[in-house]
Amino acid sequence: MPTTQTCKNLIIGAGLSGLVLAERLANVKKERVLLIDRRAHIGGNCADSDHNGILVHQYGAHIFHTQSAKVWEYITRFGLFYPYMHRVLGLVHGKLIPIPFNLNALHAIFPKHQAKALESSLLESFGFGARVSIMQLREQNDENLKIIADFIYENIFLHYTLKQWQCAPEALDKSVFERVPILISKDDRYFPNDAYQGIPLQGYSKMFAKMIENPLIEVRLNTEASSVDSSGFDRVFYSGAIDEYFAYEFGELPYRSLELKNVELEREYFGKNSVINYPKNYDFTRIIEHKYFLDTRTPRTIITYEFPKAWQRGDERYYPMPTKEAMSQYERYASKAKSLPGVFFIGRLGEYKYYDMDKAILRALEIFEGL
Ligand SMILES: Cc1cc2nc3c(=O)[nH]c(=O)nc-3n(C[C@H](O)[C@H](O)[C@H](O)COP(=O)(O)OP(=O)(O)OC[C@H]3O[C@@H](n4cnc5c(N)ncnc54)[C@H](O)[C@@H]3O)c2cc1C
Protein backbone atom coordinates (compact mmCIF):
# COMPACT_ATOMS: atom_id res chain seq x y z
CA MET A 1 0.00 0.00 0.00
CA PRO A 2 1.24 3.53 -0.69
CA THR A 3 2.15 5.70 2.27
CA THR A 4 1.46 9.39 2.55
CA GLN A 5 5.19 10.10 1.96
CA THR A 6 5.35 8.28 -1.37
CA CYS A 7 2.07 9.69 -2.74
CA LYS A 8 2.35 12.35 -5.34
CA ASN A 9 -1.29 13.38 -5.37
CA LEU A 10 -3.67 14.26 -2.57
CA ILE A 11 -7.32 14.36 -3.57
CA ILE A 12 -9.70 15.86 -1.05
CA GLY A 13 -13.22 14.61 -1.66
CA ALA A 14 -14.18 11.22 -3.10
CA GLY A 15 -17.13 12.61 -5.07
CA LEU A 16 -17.32 12.17 -8.81
CA SER A 17 -14.74 14.91 -9.55
CA GLY A 18 -12.18 13.41 -7.16
CA LEU A 19 -12.87 9.86 -8.35
CA VAL A 20 -12.29 10.69 -12.02
CA LEU A 21 -8.99 12.38 -11.22
CA ALA A 22 -7.87 9.52 -8.98
CA GLU A 23 -8.75 6.98 -11.67
CA ARG A 24 -6.91 8.89 -14.41
CA LEU A 25 -3.81 9.67 -12.34
CA ALA A 26 -3.42 6.04 -11.24
CA ASN A 27 -4.43 4.23 -14.43
CA VAL A 28 -2.90 6.56 -17.03
CA LYS A 29 -0.04 8.36 -15.30
CA LYS A 30 0.68 5.43 -12.93
CA GLU A 31 1.00 7.89 -10.06
CA ARG A 32 0.15 7.33 -6.44
CA VAL A 33 -2.99 8.94 -5.07
CA LEU A 34 -4.26 9.47 -1.57
CA LEU A 35 -8.01 10.01 -1.82
CA ILE A 36 -9.71 11.22 1.34
CA ASP A 37 -13.27 12.08 2.28
CA ARG A 38 -14.83 13.32 5.49
CA ARG A 39 -17.89 11.14 4.86
CA ALA A 40 -18.01 7.41 5.61
CA HIS A 41 -18.48 6.51 1.93
CA ILE A 42 -17.17 7.34 -1.54
CA GLY A 43 -19.34 8.89 -4.27
CA GLY A 44 -20.14 12.26 -2.67
CA ASN A 45 -23.68 13.35 -3.44
CA CYS A 46 -24.13 10.64 -6.10
CA ALA A 47 -23.85 7.82 -3.54
CA ASP A 48 -26.55 5.18 -3.29
CA SER A 49 -27.16 2.28 -0.93
CA ASP A 50 -29.21 -0.89 -0.85
CA HIS A 51 -32.31 -0.93 1.34
CA ASN A 52 -34.05 -4.32 1.24
CA GLY A 53 -33.26 -4.78 -2.46
CA ILE A 54 -34.05 -1.18 -3.51
CA LEU A 55 -31.17 1.14 -4.39
CA VAL A 56 -31.79 4.45 -2.67
CA HIS A 57 -30.13 7.64 -3.96
CA GLN A 58 -28.92 9.01 -0.64
CA TYR A 59 -28.67 12.69 -1.63
CA GLY A 60 -31.60 13.07 -4.02
CA ALA A 61 -32.43 11.51 -7.40
CA HIS A 62 -29.41 11.14 -9.71
CA ILE A 63 -30.05 10.40 -13.36
CA PHE A 64 -27.06 10.07 -15.62
CA HIS A 65 -27.61 11.94 -18.89
CA THR A 66 -25.28 13.45 -21.46
CA GLN A 67 -24.87 14.51 -25.07
CA SER A 68 -21.17 13.76 -24.87
CA ALA A 69 -20.00 10.52 -26.48
CA LYS A 70 -16.64 11.08 -24.73
CA VAL A 71 -18.25 11.08 -21.27
CA TRP A 72 -20.46 8.09 -22.09
CA GLU A 73 -17.53 6.09 -23.42
CA TYR A 74 -15.58 6.94 -20.27
CA ILE A 75 -18.22 6.13 -17.64
CA THR A 76 -19.50 2.94 -19.24
CA ARG A 77 -16.02 1.40 -18.86
CA PHE A 78 -16.90 0.91 -15.21
CA GLY A 79 -20.27 -0.79 -15.46
CA LEU A 80 -23.43 -1.45 -17.42
CA PHE A 81 -26.20 1.14 -17.46
CA TYR A 82 -29.91 0.34 -17.31
CA PRO A 83 -31.49 2.24 -20.25
CA TYR A 84 -33.70 4.48 -18.12
CA MET A 85 -35.19 7.55 -19.80
CA HIS A 86 -36.10 10.19 -17.25
CA ARG A 87 -39.60 11.62 -17.13
CA VAL A 88 -40.90 13.96 -14.46
CA LEU A 89 -44.54 14.53 -13.61
CA GLY A 90 -45.88 17.57 -11.77
CA LEU A 91 -49.10 17.90 -9.82
CA VAL A 92 -50.68 21.00 -11.35
CA HIS A 93 -54.36 21.92 -10.87
CA GLY A 94 -54.88 18.42 -9.47
CA LYS A 95 -53.54 16.72 -12.61
CA LEU A 96 -50.24 14.95 -13.20
CA ILE A 97 -48.67 16.64 -16.23
CA PRO A 98 -45.25 16.32 -17.86
CA ILE A 99 -42.47 18.59 -16.57
CA PRO A 100 -40.96 20.46 -18.41
CA PHE A 101 -44.29 21.84 -19.61
CA ASN A 102 -44.89 20.76 -23.20
CA LEU A 103 -47.73 20.44 -25.72
CA ASN A 104 -49.07 17.34 -23.94
CA ALA A 105 -49.24 19.35 -20.70
CA LEU A 106 -51.04 22.15 -22.54
CA HIS A 107 -53.73 19.75 -23.75
CA ALA A 108 -54.07 18.17 -20.30
CA ILE A 109 -54.66 21.53 -18.62
CA PHE A 110 -56.70 23.70 -21.01
CA PRO A 111 -60.12 22.89 -22.54
CA LYS A 112 -59.89 21.33 -26.01
CA HIS A 113 -60.67 24.40 -28.16
CA GLN A 114 -58.55 26.78 -26.15
CA ALA A 115 -55.65 24.29 -26.12
CA LYS A 116 -55.76 24.09 -29.94
CA ALA A 117 -55.59 27.88 -30.28
CA LEU A 118 -52.79 28.18 -27.71
CA GLU A 119 -50.83 25.41 -29.40
CA SER A 120 -51.14 27.20 -32.78
CA SER A 121 -49.74 30.40 -31.26
CA LEU A 122 -46.78 28.53 -29.78
CA LEU A 123 -46.08 26.76 -33.06
CA GLU A 124 -46.34 29.97 -35.11
CA SER A 125 -44.09 31.93 -32.78
CA PHE A 126 -41.40 29.39 -32.00
CA GLY A 127 -41.78 26.37 -34.30
CA PHE A 128 -42.09 22.69 -33.42
CA GLY A 129 -39.20 21.37 -31.34
CA ALA A 130 -38.21 24.76 -29.87
CA ARG A 131 -37.10 25.17 -26.23
CA VAL A 132 -38.32 28.43 -24.75
CA SER A 133 -37.45 29.77 -21.33
CA ILE A 134 -40.25 31.07 -19.11
CA MET A 135 -38.58 34.50 -19.11
CA GLN A 136 -38.59 34.55 -22.94
CA LEU A 137 -42.25 33.47 -23.02
CA ARG A 138 -43.25 36.20 -20.58
CA GLU A 139 -41.75 38.85 -22.87
CA GLN A 140 -44.12 38.00 -25.77
CA ASN A 141 -46.96 40.38 -26.72
CA ASP A 142 -49.36 37.84 -28.25
CA GLU A 143 -52.51 37.38 -26.08
CA ASN A 144 -52.47 33.57 -26.27
CA LEU A 145 -48.79 33.42 -25.34
CA LYS A 146 -49.49 35.68 -22.38
CA ILE A 147 -52.17 33.26 -21.14
CA ILE A 148 -49.73 30.34 -21.33
CA ALA A 149 -46.86 32.32 -19.79
CA ASP A 150 -49.01 33.50 -16.86
CA PHE A 151 -50.31 30.00 -16.22
CA ILE A 152 -46.88 28.37 -16.27
CA TYR A 153 -45.23 31.12 -14.26
CA GLU A 154 -47.86 31.06 -11.53
CA ASN A 155 -48.44 27.31 -11.34
CA ILE A 156 -45.04 25.84 -12.11
CA PHE A 157 -42.24 28.36 -11.52
CA LEU A 158 -43.21 30.95 -8.92
CA HIS A 159 -44.06 28.85 -5.87
CA TYR A 160 -41.55 26.13 -6.71
CA THR A 161 -38.83 28.80 -6.86
CA LEU A 162 -39.97 30.32 -3.57
CA LYS A 163 -39.80 26.89 -1.94
CA GLN A 164 -36.53 25.87 -3.58
CA TRP A 165 -34.58 29.13 -3.38
CA GLN A 166 -36.57 31.21 -0.92
CA CYS A 167 -36.54 34.14 -3.33
CA ALA A 168 -38.47 35.38 -6.37
CA PRO A 169 -37.46 34.00 -9.81
CA GLU A 170 -36.28 37.47 -10.89
CA ALA A 171 -33.50 37.42 -8.26
CA LEU A 172 -31.87 34.34 -9.80
CA ASP A 173 -29.57 33.89 -12.75
CA LYS A 174 -31.50 33.08 -15.93
CA SER A 175 -29.55 29.82 -16.36
CA VAL A 176 -31.71 28.34 -13.55
CA PHE A 177 -34.81 28.68 -15.73
CA GLU A 178 -33.08 27.70 -18.95
CA ARG A 179 -32.49 24.30 -17.36
CA VAL A 180 -36.28 23.74 -17.29
CA PRO A 181 -37.56 25.25 -20.56
CA ILE A 182 -41.03 25.03 -22.08
CA LEU A 183 -40.82 22.42 -24.82
CA ILE A 184 -42.80 22.97 -28.01
CA SER A 185 -43.02 19.26 -28.59
CA LYS A 186 -44.80 16.11 -27.45
CA ASP A 187 -41.70 14.37 -26.15
CA ASP A 188 -42.27 13.91 -22.41
CA ARG A 189 -38.66 13.08 -21.56
CA TYR A 190 -36.93 15.43 -19.12
CA PHE A 191 -33.70 15.38 -21.18
CA PRO A 192 -34.95 14.94 -24.77
CA ASN A 193 -31.65 16.12 -26.26
CA ASP A 194 -29.36 13.78 -24.35
CA ALA A 195 -28.66 10.72 -26.48
CA TYR A 196 -27.07 8.87 -23.57
CA GLN A 197 -29.12 8.34 -20.42
CA GLY A 198 -29.34 5.68 -17.75
CA ILE A 199 -28.75 4.47 -14.22
CA PRO A 200 -25.78 2.22 -13.33
CA LEU A 201 -27.20 -1.29 -13.12
CA GLN A 202 -25.28 -2.09 -9.90
CA GLY A 203 -25.76 1.43 -8.56
CA TYR A 204 -23.44 4.45 -8.50
CA SER A 205 -21.47 3.45 -5.42
CA LYS A 206 -20.48 0.02 -6.79
CA MET A 207 -19.56 1.56 -10.15
CA PHE A 208 -17.42 4.19 -8.40
CA ALA A 209 -15.65 1.50 -6.35
CA LYS A 210 -14.69 -0.15 -9.64
CA MET A 211 -13.29 3.12 -10.97
CA ILE A 212 -10.70 3.30 -8.22
CA GLU A 213 -9.73 -0.39 -8.10
CA ASN A 214 -5.99 0.24 -8.40
CA PRO A 215 -3.35 -0.45 -5.73
CA LEU A 216 -1.86 2.97 -6.47
CA ILE A 217 -4.97 4.57 -4.94
CA GLU A 218 -5.33 4.65 -1.17
CA VAL A 219 -8.75 5.68 0.14
CA ARG A 220 -9.22 7.11 3.62
CA LEU A 221 -12.79 7.75 4.69
CA ASN A 222 -13.99 9.70 7.74
CA THR A 223 -10.93 11.88 7.16
CA GLU A 224 -10.98 15.68 7.29
CA ALA A 225 -8.75 17.68 4.92
CA SER A 226 -7.34 19.52 7.93
CA SER A 227 -6.07 16.23 9.41
CA VAL A 228 -3.73 15.52 6.48
CA ASP A 229 -0.45 17.36 5.97
CA SER A 230 -0.56 18.36 2.30
CA SER A 231 3.02 19.66 2.14
CA GLY A 232 4.52 16.34 1.00
CA PHE A 233 2.40 16.14 -2.16
CA ASP A 234 3.22 17.37 -5.65
CA ARG A 235 -0.41 18.18 -6.40
CA VAL A 236 -3.48 18.75 -4.25
CA PHE A 237 -6.96 18.52 -5.74
CA TYR A 238 -9.54 20.05 -3.45
CA SER A 239 -13.22 19.34 -4.08
CA GLY A 240 -14.50 20.71 -0.78
CA ALA A 241 -16.06 24.15 -0.36
CA ILE A 242 -13.65 26.90 -1.43
CA ASP A 243 -14.79 29.32 1.30
CA GLU A 244 -14.15 26.68 3.96
CA TYR A 245 -10.61 26.14 2.56
CA PHE A 246 -9.88 29.85 3.13
CA ALA A 247 -11.49 29.84 6.60
CA TYR A 248 -14.41 31.97 5.32
CA GLU A 249 -12.09 34.96 4.90
CA PHE A 250 -14.51 36.75 2.55
CA GLY A 251 -17.63 35.43 4.29
CA GLU A 252 -19.71 32.27 3.86
CA LEU A 253 -20.78 31.49 0.32
CA PRO A 254 -24.56 30.95 0.32
CA TYR A 255 -26.01 27.53 -0.45
CA ARG A 256 -29.40 25.87 -0.35
CA SER A 257 -29.66 22.63 1.50
CA LEU A 258 -32.25 19.84 1.62
CA GLU A 259 -33.88 17.75 4.25
CA LEU A 260 -34.53 14.33 2.78
CA LYS A 261 -37.15 12.22 4.52
CA ASN A 262 -37.21 8.53 3.54
CA VAL A 263 -40.33 6.46 4.07
CA GLU A 264 -40.56 2.71 3.52
CA LEU A 265 -44.02 1.43 2.65
CA GLU A 266 -45.63 -2.02 2.71
CA ARG A 267 -47.07 -1.68 -0.78
CA GLU A 268 -45.70 -2.31 -4.24
CA TYR A 269 -45.84 1.29 -5.50
CA PHE A 270 -46.65 4.64 -3.94
CA GLY A 271 -47.06 6.85 -7.01
CA LYS A 272 -47.00 6.73 -10.77
CA ASN A 273 -43.45 7.87 -11.49
CA SER A 274 -39.84 8.04 -10.24
CA VAL A 275 -40.08 11.79 -9.60
CA ILE A 276 -43.24 13.78 -9.00
CA ASN A 277 -42.95 17.54 -8.49
CA TYR A 278 -45.32 19.51 -6.30
CA PRO A 279 -44.73 23.05 -7.55
CA LYS A 280 -47.55 24.79 -5.68
CA ASN A 281 -48.82 22.58 -2.86
CA TYR A 282 -47.08 21.27 0.25
CA ASP A 283 -43.71 22.30 1.74
CA PHE A 284 -41.75 19.64 -0.10
CA THR A 285 -40.81 20.16 -3.75
CA ARG A 286 -40.82 16.57 -4.92
CA ILE A 287 -41.24 12.92 -4.02
CA ILE A 288 -38.79 10.37 -5.38
CA GLU A 289 -39.77 6.72 -5.68
CA HIS A 290 -36.46 4.92 -6.05
CA LYS A 291 -37.54 1.55 -7.45
CA TYR A 292 -38.56 3.13 -10.75
CA PHE A 293 -34.94 3.92 -11.68
CA LEU A 294 -33.97 0.28 -12.16
CA ASP A 295 -37.51 -1.08 -12.50
CA THR A 296 -36.92 -3.08 -9.32
CA ARG A 297 -39.60 -5.65 -8.49
CA THR A 298 -40.20 -5.85 -4.74
CA PRO A 299 -43.38 -6.04 -2.66
CA ARG A 300 -42.30 -2.87 -0.80
CA THR A 301 -41.34 0.61 -1.91
CA ILE A 302 -39.21 3.48 -0.62
CA ILE A 303 -40.01 7.12 -1.24
CA THR A 304 -38.10 10.29 -0.36
CA TYR A 305 -39.67 13.69 0.35
CA GLU A 306 -37.41 16.64 -0.53
CA PHE A 307 -37.80 19.68 1.72
CA PRO A 308 -35.58 22.61 0.67
CA LYS A 309 -34.00 24.64 3.46
CA ALA A 310 -31.44 27.34 4.05
CA TRP A 311 -27.90 26.07 4.48
CA GLN A 312 -26.15 26.58 7.81
CA ARG A 313 -22.73 25.37 8.88
CA GLY A 314 -22.93 21.65 9.60
CA ASP A 315 -25.62 21.01 6.93
CA GLU A 316 -24.87 19.31 3.63
CA ARG A 317 -24.32 21.87 0.85
CA TYR A 318 -26.59 21.09 -2.11
CA TYR A 319 -27.03 24.04 -4.47
CA PRO A 320 -24.80 27.12 -4.84
CA MET A 321 -27.01 30.25 -4.93
CA PRO A 322 -27.19 31.42 -8.57
CA THR A 323 -27.20 35.15 -7.78
CA LYS A 324 -24.87 37.99 -8.86
CA GLU A 325 -23.84 38.75 -5.25
CA ALA A 326 -22.85 35.13 -4.58
CA MET A 327 -20.87 34.97 -7.83
CA SER A 328 -18.87 38.09 -7.06
CA GLN A 329 -18.14 36.79 -3.55
CA TYR A 330 -16.95 33.52 -5.13
CA GLU A 331 -14.70 35.46 -7.55
CA ARG A 332 -12.75 36.84 -4.57
CA TYR A 333 -12.04 33.30 -3.39
CA ALA A 334 -11.25 32.13 -6.94
CA SER A 335 -8.64 34.82 -7.49
CA LYS A 336 -6.99 33.97 -4.15
CA ALA A 337 -7.01 30.29 -5.18
CA LYS A 338 -5.03 31.14 -8.34
CA SER A 339 -2.08 32.23 -6.20
CA LEU A 340 -1.63 28.72 -4.76
CA PRO A 341 0.68 26.69 -7.01
CA GLY A 342 -0.09 22.98 -7.22
CA VAL A 343 -3.56 23.30 -5.63
CA PHE A 344 -6.50 22.67 -7.95
CA PHE A 345 -10.00 23.64 -6.82
CA ILE A 346 -12.37 21.22 -8.47
CA GLY A 347 -16.00 20.15 -8.58
CA ARG A 348 -19.22 21.74 -7.56
CA LEU A 349 -17.95 22.99 -4.18
CA GLY A 350 -14.41 23.90 -5.22
CA GLU A 351 -15.70 25.91 -8.20
CA TYR A 352 -19.00 26.97 -6.59
CA LYS A 353 -20.92 25.87 -9.62
CA TYR A 354 -23.83 23.52 -10.25
CA TYR A 355 -22.37 20.67 -12.31
CA ASP A 356 -24.44 17.81 -13.66
CA MET A 357 -22.51 14.54 -13.40
CA ASP A 358 -21.47 14.57 -17.05
CA LYS A 359 -20.13 18.12 -16.75
CA ALA A 360 -18.26 17.21 -13.55
CA ILE A 361 -16.64 14.30 -15.43
CA LEU A 362 -15.78 16.46 -18.45
CA ARG A 363 -14.25 19.13 -16.23
CA ALA A 364 -12.17 16.56 -14.31
CA LEU A 365 -10.98 15.00 -17.58
CA GLU A 366 -10.08 18.45 -18.88
CA ILE A 367 -8.08 19.21 -15.72
CA PHE A 368 -6.30 15.87 -16.01
CA GLU A 369 -5.50 16.44 -19.70
CA GLY A 370 -4.05 19.85 -18.82
CA LEU A 371 -1.57 18.51 -16.23
C1 LIG B 1 -30.22 17.07 -5.14
C2 LIG B 1 -29.28 16.90 -6.30
C3 LIG B 1 -29.68 16.13 -7.38
C4 LIG B 1 -28.82 15.96 -8.47
N1 LIG B 1 -29.26 15.21 -9.52
C5 LIG B 1 -28.45 15.06 -10.58
C6 LIG B 1 -28.90 14.31 -11.71
O1 LIG B 1 -30.03 13.79 -11.74
N2 LIG B 1 -28.06 14.17 -12.77
C7 LIG B 1 -26.81 14.74 -12.78
O2 LIG B 1 -26.10 14.60 -13.79
N3 LIG B 1 -26.36 15.45 -11.72
C8 LIG B 1 -27.14 15.62 -10.62
N4 LIG B 1 -26.68 16.33 -9.54
C9 LIG B 1 -25.29 16.84 -9.55
C10 LIG B 1 -24.26 15.84 -8.96
O3 LIG B 1 -24.57 15.58 -7.62
C11 LIG B 1 -22.85 16.47 -9.11
O4 LIG B 1 -22.53 16.55 -10.47
C12 LIG B 1 -21.75 15.67 -8.42
O5 LIG B 1 -22.08 15.39 -7.09
C13 LIG B 1 -20.45 16.45 -8.48
O6 LIG B 1 -19.44 15.75 -7.81
P1 LIG B 1 -18.30 16.52 -6.99
O7 LIG B 1 -17.24 15.54 -6.77
O8 LIG B 1 -17.94 17.78 -7.70
O9 LIG B 1 -19.00 16.96 -5.62
P2 LIG B 1 -19.49 16.12 -4.37
O10 LIG B 1 -20.33 14.97 -4.82
O11 LIG B 1 -20.14 17.08 -3.45
O12 LIG B 1 -18.18 15.56 -3.69
C14 LIG B 1 -17.35 16.35 -2.86
C15 LIG B 1 -16.83 15.45 -1.73
O13 LIG B 1 -15.87 16.18 -0.97
C16 LIG B 1 -16.01 15.82 0.38
N5 LIG B 1 -15.45 16.90 1.20
C17 LIG B 1 -15.82 18.20 1.19
N6 LIG B 1 -15.06 18.91 2.05
C18 LIG B 1 -14.18 18.04 2.59
C19 LIG B 1 -13.14 18.19 3.56
N7 LIG B 1 -12.84 19.39 4.12
N8 LIG B 1 -12.42 17.09 3.90
C20 LIG B 1 -12.70 15.88 3.35
N9 LIG B 1 -13.68 15.69 2.43
C21 LIG B 1 -14.41 16.77 2.06
C22 LIG B 1 -17.51 15.66 0.57
O14 LIG B 1 -17.82 14.85 1.69
C23 LIG B 1 -17.92 15.02 -0.77
O15 LIG B 1 -17.96 13.61 -0.67
C24 LIG B 1 -27.53 16.56 -8.46
C25 LIG B 1 -27.14 17.34 -7.37
C26 LIG B 1 -28.00 17.53 -6.31
C27 LIG B 1 -27.59 18.42 -5.18
Image (cartoon, rainbow, N blue to C red):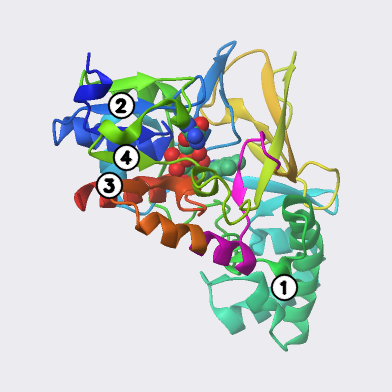
Per the image, the residue denoted by label 3 is: 342
Disc number for residue 236: 4
Q: CA distance from mark 4 to mark 1?
A: 58 Å
Which residue, given by chain and number where applicable, does mark 2 sit on? 34
Taking the magenta stretch, the answer to whether it contains residue 276 is no
Q: Identify the magenta region.
A: 312-331
Residue at (74%, 46%) from the top-left corner? 310
Report the quarter where the N terminus lies.
top left
In the rendered image, which quarter is residue 193 located in?
Answer: bottom left
Amino acid tagged 3: Gly
The kind of residue on which mark 2 rests is Leu
Q: Nearer the viewer, mark 4 or mark 1?
A: 4
Cα distance between the residues tagged 4 and 2:
10 Å
Q: Could you tell which of marks 3 and 4 lies nearer the N-terminus?
A: 4
Residue 203 lies left or right of residue 259; in this view the side is left
Q: Earlier in the sequence, mark 1 or mark 3?
A: 1
Where, by quadrant of the figure, is residue 31 drawn? Answer: top left
Which of the two discs, 4 and 1, labels the residue nearer the N terminus? 1
Q: Which residue is mark 1?
A: 116
